[in-house]
Image (cartoon, rainbow, N blue to C red):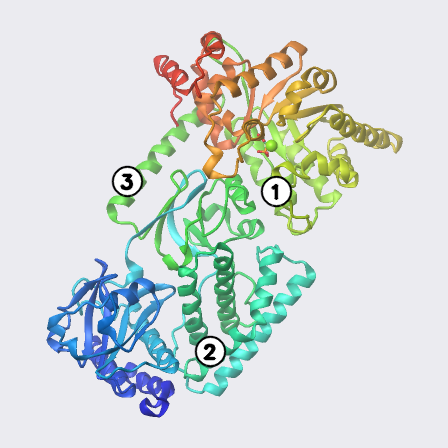
């Protein structure tokens, strides 16, 4: 068929002329359909545009009844045109009328056409319309013709996206400008209103049609070579933090960048007459369409990688040498970052004072970037599929880190509702701030020490902001998780010293490295484990690789010279593990003295209660440990055998169940009897109702995220510790098999007018 329609190059050249003509949009579209029909020897060529209401409207036609233009519409999914829009891929039929989806619109007069080729008009993965050619004869369109039509559709996509068609049809508004809403996973509490900043901005390709194809081919080759070289360098140097990627993603990039099939498709697209950038976009559209259809999570992931790589290739074409490195441009006020995924170091590169929110296509509660977002107090939502295709730079957006929703280009109503919500939250924060200087004690005078969970330098200002009594849990692994390579002793020491300086005379409890499980260090190769939460992690790793633990202990002892030092060990499951860890500390301490270094003025060693086996060794542990800290997140996970990171089961058992409350009560009673301080540092301490119950069980120290201090304090000030304790005793002794005591505790709180609702 090549000779018959002159090939895509000729078509593109003619299109360029039409695009340059100073005519109205409708006229231009009319000329384009005539041109395509003539070039493809088709009797019909029509353009359908997707309207705001989701219908497809006939915008121009050559061959069908012209009176049907702007009158014929179909729903997305209706007829063959609707099918193309729905599936976002070409439909090529020699006998269209026998296809089950065929639907006949009498006003168009299309009943006499048998063959049908429809391609989606795509831009950045969004369907903006459908471009169709039809013939009377039973004809199958060649691959080359499909390619040519898809390429032409790109030109029309630009016309639509540019807004040139505004006012031409009925309810027209470029698809990308419509309000959009999506629900994902709430990852970091808070609400952010602002404007989209794409972490890896897409290059907007304006020039689609090439003037000199040979030159474009050369540009493509140079960019590909540059991209391949930079990936190699990054892998060889182990420089994963720079792009925020992990090794396996970079390996996938390397594989695709060297894939002959991909290179060939790009070349072919250039040879049809596109610029190198347009060729990348053209091939990328196919990838995106495949991605949307792919249900296998692994293959989908790889297609994502390929799409990502195509973005990088575009950047390499526009600014050589920039392909692999995200641009951190100057942020506007109220910036909401949108990214497929991001490394923690990359997030810290942005100006935090301007950041209001983060939207990720991936991301889970334990991903490193999310940990940093929480520490920075930025609202974050993850698992928003296709987020970066849904938005454009500068779009208004709302991130609801409470419900896990995002609103892109929100309507006035939605925006007003959120402005109210933000105002309400700010007022409440204001009230909490007013409580900052109030001593934290219950109505009947029981002192409850409220402390912070922290782990990064960026957490430290929260100490003064919240008026917390100290740091009850300093997660030392966070420094390791956000670093590009293993932090050396000096860097560790520096951080610990900064923490102690910031805390001034307030106590800080450092927890030794809790890595492994879901806390993966990108630079440390770990054997894959079937059950990482039960695997080689935390103190197990520390005792098996004593050099790592020793280095950390040494850094802690040095940093705390002349000051009080509290260290605790995570995931201890037996008394012998605690003994072994304590020996390491003692030896390091003795070594410091031997070498004449200053030592801490006091040293307390504690144990985290998070593995149930310790519940049955409490007497022995209490004889040895200076203090206990209950890690309720893990204790709940292991006691009920529910994966804390698996949304399907994580909420299955209530921490306010008799089983868990009795467990917690027993730990508090034993510690109190032994005269050993006990703190609780899991998430449950951050919730007012749970905090009230914990006070009722005898806990007098809770450690939590900074944002929770205000709400917990506000609630506890009105609690009568004696009363709640008396109320809970018979509840815990009940034998009715209830799964939760939440209702009873809520009722008690309501009766006493306690502010326990969040
Ligand atoms: C816990 O398990 O409750 C805890 C505080 O530790 P992490 O959440 O860091 O495992
Ligand atoms: Mg834990």
Tell me if I can see residue 439 in this picture: no
Q: What residue do we see at 64% from left, 44% from top?
A: 529
- Label 2 belongs to which residue? 276
Sequence order check: which comes first, mark 1 or mark 3?
3
Pinpoint residue 106: horizontal percent, then vertical percent: 11, 71
Residue 550 occupies quadrant: top right
Task: Say whether marks 1 and 3 touch (CB < 8 Å).
Answer: no
Label 1, ligand 1: CB separation under 8 Å:
yes
**Residue 670 on image: x %, y %:** 63, 13
Q: Which secondary structure, mark 1?
A: loop
Marks 3 and 2 sit apart, C-alpha to C-alpha, by 45 Å
Q: Earlier in the sequence, mark 3 or mark 2?
A: 2
Q: Position of residue 192 (x, y in %)?
A: 39, 44
Mark 2 burial class by Cα count in 10 Å: few <14, some 14-19, many 20+: many
Query: Which residue corresponds to mark 3?
Result: 417
- Residue 519: assigned label: 1
Asked if the residues shown at circle 3 and circle 2 are in contact, with their CB atoms under 8 angstroms apart, the answer is: no
Q: Residue at x 41, y 84 (%)?
A: 273
Q: Quadrant of the C terminus?
A: top left
Compared with 643, 689 (above or below) is above
The kind of secondary structure element at disc 3 is helix
Pointer 1 or 2: first along the chain: 2
Give SS at disc 2.
helix
Relative height, residue 655 to residue 292 (above, below): above
Which of the 4 image quadrants contains residue 25? bottom left
The quarter of the image holding the N terminus is bottom left
Find the residue positioned furthest to the right.
594
* Number of the front mark, 3 or 2: 2
Question: Which mark's residue is nearer the viewer, 1 or 3?
Answer: 1
Residue 716 appears in the picture as rendered = yes
Left of 129 or right of it: where is 254?
Answer: right
């Amino acid at each position: 068929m090549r000779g018959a329609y002159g090939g895509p190059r000729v078509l593109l050249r003619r299109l360029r002329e039409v695009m340059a003509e100073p005519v109205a949009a409708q006229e231009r579209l009319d000329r384009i359909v005539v041109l395509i029909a003539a070039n493809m020897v088709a009797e019909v060529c029509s353009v359908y545009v997707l309207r705001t209401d989701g219908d497809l409207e006939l915008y121009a036609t050559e061959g069908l009844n012209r009176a049907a233009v702007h009158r014929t519409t179909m729903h997305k999914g209706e007829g063959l045109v609707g099918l193309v829009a729905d599936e976002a891929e070409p439909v090529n039929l020699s006998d269209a009328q026998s296809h089950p989806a065929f639907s006949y619109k009498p006003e168009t007069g299309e009943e006499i056409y048998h063959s049908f080729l429809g391609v989606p008009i795509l831009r950045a993965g969004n369907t903006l319309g459908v471009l169709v050619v039809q013939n009377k004869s039973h004809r199958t369109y060649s691959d080359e013709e499909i390619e040519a039509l898809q390429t032409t559709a790109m030109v029309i996509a630009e016309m639509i996206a540019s807004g040139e068609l505004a006012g031409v049809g009925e309810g027209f508004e470029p698809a990308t400008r419509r309000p959009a809403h999506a629900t994902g996973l709430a990852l970091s509490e808070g609400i952010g209103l602002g404007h989209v900043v794409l972490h890896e901005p897409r290059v907007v390709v304006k020039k689609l049609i090439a003037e000199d194809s040979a030159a474009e081919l050369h540009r493509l080759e140079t960019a590909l070579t540059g991209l391949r070289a930079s990936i190699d360098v990054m892998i060889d140097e182990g420089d994963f933090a720079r792009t925020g990627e992990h090794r396996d993603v970079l390996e996938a990039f390397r594989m695709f960048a060297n894939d002959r099939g991909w290179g060939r498709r790009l070349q072919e697209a250039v040879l049809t007459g596109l610029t190198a950038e347009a060729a990348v976009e053209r091939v990328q559209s196919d990838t995106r369409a495949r991605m949307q259809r792919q249900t296998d999570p692994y293959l989908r992931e790889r297609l994502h990688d390929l799409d990502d790589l195509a973005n990088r290739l575009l950047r390499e074409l526009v600014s050589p040498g920039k392909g692999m490195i995200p641009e951190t441009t100057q942020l506007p006020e109220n910036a909401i970052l949108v990214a497929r995924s991001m490394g923690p170091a990359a997030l810290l590169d942005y100006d935090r004072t301007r950041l209001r929110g983060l939207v990720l296509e991936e991301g889970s509660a334990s991903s490193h970037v999310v940990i940093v977002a929480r520490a920075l107090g930025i609202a974050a939502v993850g698992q928003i599929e296709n987020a970066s295709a849904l938005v454009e730079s500068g779009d208004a957006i709302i991130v609801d880190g409470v419900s896990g929703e995002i609103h892109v280009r929100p309507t006035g109503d939605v925006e007003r509702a959120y402005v109210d919500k933000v105002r309400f939250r700010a007022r409440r924060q204001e009230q909490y701030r007013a409580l900052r200087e109030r001593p934290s004690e219950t109505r009947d005078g029981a002192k409850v020490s409220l402390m912070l969970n922290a782990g990064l330098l960026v957490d430290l200002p929260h100490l003064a902001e919240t008026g917390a009594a100290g740091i009850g849990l300093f997660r030392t692994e966070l420094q390791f998780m956000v670093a590009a390579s293993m932090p050396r002793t000096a860097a560790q020491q520096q951080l610990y010293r900064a923490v102690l300086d910031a805390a001034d005379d307030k106590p800080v409890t450092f927890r030794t490295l809790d890595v492994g499980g879901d806390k993966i260090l990108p630079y440390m190769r770990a054997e894959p484990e079937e059950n990482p939460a039960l695997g080689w992690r935390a103190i197990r790793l520390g005792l098996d690789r004593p050099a790592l633990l020793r280095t950390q202990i040494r850094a802690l002892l040095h940093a705390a010279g002349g000051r009080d030092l509290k260290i605790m060990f995570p995931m201890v499951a037996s008394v012998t593990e605690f003994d072994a860890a304590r020996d390491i500390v003692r030896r390091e301490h003795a070594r410091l003295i031997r070498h004449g270094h200053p030592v801490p003025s006091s040293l307390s060693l504690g144990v985290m209660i998070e593995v149930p086996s310790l519940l049955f060794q409490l007497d022995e542990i209490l004889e040895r440990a200076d203090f206990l800290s209950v890690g309720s997140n893990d204790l709940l996970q292991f006691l009920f055998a529910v994966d804390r990171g698996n949304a399907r089961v994580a909420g299955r058992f209530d921490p306010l169940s008799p089983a868990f409350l009795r467990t917690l009560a027993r730990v508090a009673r034993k510690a109190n009897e032994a005269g050993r301080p006990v703190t609780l540092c899991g998430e449950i301490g951050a919730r007012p109702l749970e905090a009230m119950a914990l006070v009722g069980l005898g806990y007098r120290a809770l450690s939590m995220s900074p944002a929770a201090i205000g709400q917990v304090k506000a609630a506890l000030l009105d609690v009568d510790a004696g009363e709640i304790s008396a109320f809970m005793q018979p509840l815990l002794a009940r034998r009715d098999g209830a799964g939760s005591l939440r209702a009873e505790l809520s009722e008690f709180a309501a009766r006493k007018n306690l502010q326990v609702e969040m």
